[in-house]
Amino acid sequence: MVLSTEAALITSGPRSPPSQHDAPDLQHEVQRLVGRCLLRLQQYETLIKYLVAHHQLSGPAYALERIRVQRVKEHATKPLGYQIDVLLRSFFTTSEAPHTRIDDASPLIGSPAFGYRSTMRLSAEDYARTKAELRHLVDARNDLVHDFGSRFDLHTCEGCSAACDYLEGCYARIDTQYGKLCAWVKGVDAARIAAAAFMQAPGLSGCFNDGAEPVATTRWAEAEIVGALREAAALNAGERGWTRLDHAIALIHRKHPGLTPDSYGCKSWRHVLNESRRFDLEYRADENARRAAWFKVRDR
């Protein structure tokens, strides 16, 4: 939160009504107060865009950073009213609201996915009050930008004084909402730090940081890499169903670029064959007397 210090004029008696000679000074004060309100609103809009973009994130582990950057870009150009509508739908919840599943962007089978959402649960009364306060903030912003000049006669001292009183109250309301927003962002950032710590836990860091799924948790029967090996075996199988592994790997690289053993926590294709327990593996000497791996789909 940006703090400011302002000097206050202390008088010993009641302030005398302004004369018309004071009008230029009062007009400058109106301009200063309008600018102060608009600057605080800009700070609010910048922070609420950050909150909307970061309070939830989901998708394949390998694409999370790209998705986060895209969310930031998408919300950067949205108006304040849109940002508030998003918060009211997905950040604030009531005790009666049902839990909704986070969209995981339908990751491919065998590709680990991750999602989190930070929410603030409110009572029905608090939710209604928060909603009304945020709607009033949008109205205040629109009034300052579009209608303020027509609300007061800024050519007279009385009009300028009334405008100053209005702007003082307007700034106080904006600043109060900005303070609440800072607290919400602080909570969301704390949740993100906790989620990051969880992803660094032993056995999970490879899954979320490198896009690799721990071997012990891989559902091999559904894994895309097992399906690719079966497909390669069907297309290249020779005598008694055996397929040379390096030929199968070359085919998989052409048909499934980016599909690699390390995405499943394995060090090699032979490691995948052994860990999946869906294939038999043996070694033979090739035409150059070099050791070559062969595999076939295991009989059930």
Image (tube, helix red, strand yellow):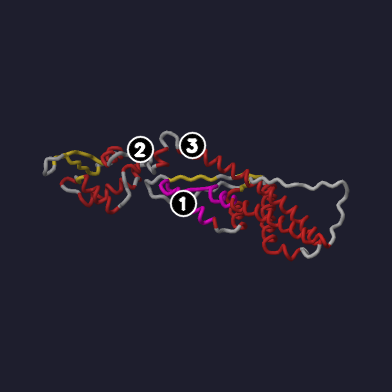
Please tell me how crowded label 1 is: few (under 14), some (14-19), or many (20+) other residues with Cα within 10 Å.
some
The residue singled out by tag 1 in the image is 67
Q: Earlier in the sequence, mark 2 or mark 1?
A: 1
On screen, 279 above or below 25? above
**Residue in the foreground of this view, choosing between 257 and 162:** 162
Q: In the rendered structure, are the residues bearing label 3 and label 1 in contact, judged by CB atoms less than 8 Å apart? A: no
The residue singled out by tag 3 in the image is 197
On screen, 277 above or below 145? above
Please tell me how crowded label 2 is: few (under 14), some (14-19), or many (20+) other residues with Cα within 10 Å.
some
Left or right side of 209 for 187:
right
Q: In the rendered structure, are the residues bearing label 3 and label 2 in contact, judged by CB atoms less than 8 Å apart? A: no
Label 3: which secondary element? helix
Residue depicted at 51% across the width and 44% down the height: 116
Indicate the position of residue 124 as horizontal and vertical percent values.
Answer: 67, 47
Q: CA distance from mark 3 to mark 1?
A: 20 Å
Q: What residue range appears in magenta?
A: 47-75
Left or right side of 133 for 99:
left
Q: Which amino acid lies under the numbered mark 3 shown in the image of this protein?
A: Ala
Q: Which amino acid lies under the numbered mark 2 shown in the image of this protein?
A: Val
Q: Earlier in the sequence, mark 3 or mark 2?
A: 3
The residue singled out by tag 2 in the image is 215
**Residue in the foreground of this view, choosing between 158 and 78:** 158
On screen, 151 above or below 5? below
Label 2: which secondary element? helix
Please tell me how crowded label 3 is: few (under 14), some (14-19), or many (20+) other residues with Cα within 10 Å.
few
Q: Which amino acid lies under the numbered mark 1 shown in the image of this protein?
A: Ile
Is residue 69 shown in magenta? Answer: yes
